[in-house]
């Protein structure tokens, strides 16, 4: 009896560990502190409206299209679409499909998996007051790959320092003020 | 066998107690002495912190729509917020959906979200107090 129960208990425990839990998705990831630091700058101004406008202009210069701009809130939303169609990938998938048809007589995966078609970079800027004399600007950029069926095949947070550094430099140049990088435990 | 049974029983009791303790908040929390604008700023910062992509902000209806993809499990999380002015302050109500299916009202994920929101609310409250002190000194 015990021999049967223990493996069953272990299987239940292991399946519980690997299952999707929404609450765990709302826990901060381990690398969040470092990512937050490169995504944020402190600007010595209380002019949130000017910062919001400068942020929107900087994103436009970087190739983004502004979706929404709320100067009162200090919020900007923007997207950028990039063509991701790869002829090599099309040839590769076609070869796999043909091979599957020849060997098994049917298509792998029901033939609905699709080919990478385009990627969308989505940017959010949120500006918060700090100590009543500064404003903290935070930019987050997410990349989502869409296939020819317009389904997301992969998504990630852009962690490249260069993108964020470029954005903050543009704001500094526009407002002619120097931003301060926040320490890791700064927020 | 007895040990195994007791361990299982302990786990069940512990889990029930844990979820019950965190279930009180549900999907709405009221923030006293705050205006909608400040609460909305805190809400946007919280969504950004949790990795949500903010899709739209409506400052007429005071609602926010945001989404997050969990690639590992192929799931889409959506978080919709609405802000309502009350006599004491602002009531923030959240609705969370996993693959377009709403989560139960007392799911612990709501508690986690409101804990995050509380941190930004505190930060903004602090900033407001410092700002008032500065202007009164000047």
Image (spheres, coloured by chain):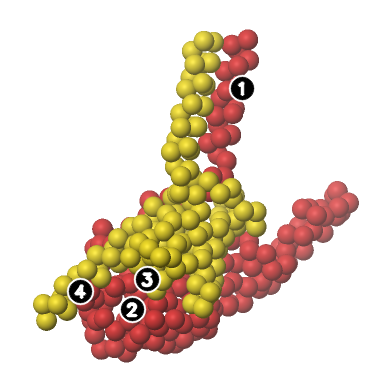
Chain colours: A red, B yellow
> Within 10 angstroms of label 3, few (less than 14), some, or many (20 or more) residues?
some
Q: Position of residue A3 (x, y in %)?
A: 60, 12
> Helix, strand or loop at disc 3?
loop
- How far apart are the two marked residues, 1 and 4, measured between alpha carbons? 62 Å
The mark nearer the N terminus, 4 or 3, is: 3
Q: Position of residue A17 (x, y in %)?
A: 53, 36
Q: Residue at x 33, y 57 (%)?
A: B119
- How far apart are the two marked residues, 3 and 2, measured between alpha carbons? 29 Å
- How far apart are the two marked residues, 4 and 3, measured between alpha carbons? 15 Å
Q: Quadrant of residue A57?
A: bottom left
Q: Chain of mark 4?
A: B
Is A172 left, or right, of B108 in this rendering?
left
Q: Chain of mark 2?
A: A
* Residue A66 against residue A129 in the figure, above or below: below
Is A91 left, or right, of B58 in this rendering?
right
> Helix, strand or loop at disc 1?
helix
Q: Residue at x 26, y 81 (%)?
A: A46
- How far apart are the two marked residues, 4 and 2, measured between alpha carbons? 29 Å
Residue assigned mark 4: B132
Q: Is residue B49 visible?
A: no
The mark nearer the N terminus, 1 or 2, is: 1
Residue assigned mark 1: A8
> Within 10 angstroms of label 1, few (less than 14), some, or many (20 or more) residues?
few
> Within 10 angstroms of label 4, few (less than 14), some, or many (20 or more) residues?
few
Count of marks overlaid on the render:
4
Residue assigned mark 2: A168
């Amino acid at each position: 009896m015990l021999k049967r129960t223990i493996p069953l208990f272990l299987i239940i425990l292991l399946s519980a560990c690997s299952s999707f839990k929404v609450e765990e998705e709302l826990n901060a990831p381990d690398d969040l502190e470092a990512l937050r630091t490169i995504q944020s700058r402190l600007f010595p101004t209380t002019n949130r409206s000017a910062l919001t406008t400068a942020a929107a202009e900087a994103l436009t210069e970087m190739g983004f299209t502004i979706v929404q701009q709320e100067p009162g809130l200090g919020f900007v939303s923007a997207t950028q679409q990039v063509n991701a169609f790869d002829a090599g990938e099309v040839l590769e998938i076609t070869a796999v499909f043909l091979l599957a048809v020849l060997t098994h007589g049917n298509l792998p995966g029901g033939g609905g998996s699709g080919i990478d078609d385009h990627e969308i970079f989505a940017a959010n800027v949120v500006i918060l007051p700090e100590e009543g004399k500064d404003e903290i600007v935070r930019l987050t950029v997410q990349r989502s790959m869409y296939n020819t069926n317009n389904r997301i095949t992969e998504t990630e947070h852009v962690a490249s320092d260069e993108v964020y550094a470029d954005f903050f430099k543009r704001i500094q140049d526009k407002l002619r003020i120097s931003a301060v990088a926040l320490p890791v435990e700064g927020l | 066998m007895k040990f195994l049974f007791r361990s299982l029983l302990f786990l069940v009791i512990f889990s029930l107690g844990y979820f019950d303790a965190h279930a009180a908040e549900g999907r709405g929390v009221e923030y006293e002495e705050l205006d909608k604008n400040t609460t909305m700023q805190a809400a946007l910062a919280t969504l950004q912190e949790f990795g949500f992509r903010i899709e739209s902000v409506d400052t007429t209806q005071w609602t926010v729509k945001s989404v997050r993809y969990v690639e590992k499990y192929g799931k889409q999380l959506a978080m919709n917020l609405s802000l309502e002015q009350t006599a004491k302050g602002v009531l923030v109500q959240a609705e969370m959906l996993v693959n377009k299916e709403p989560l139960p009202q007392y799911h612990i994920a709501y508690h986690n979200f409101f804990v995050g929101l509380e941190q930004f609310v505190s930060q903004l409250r602090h900033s407001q107090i410092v700002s008032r002190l500065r202007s009164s000194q000047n």
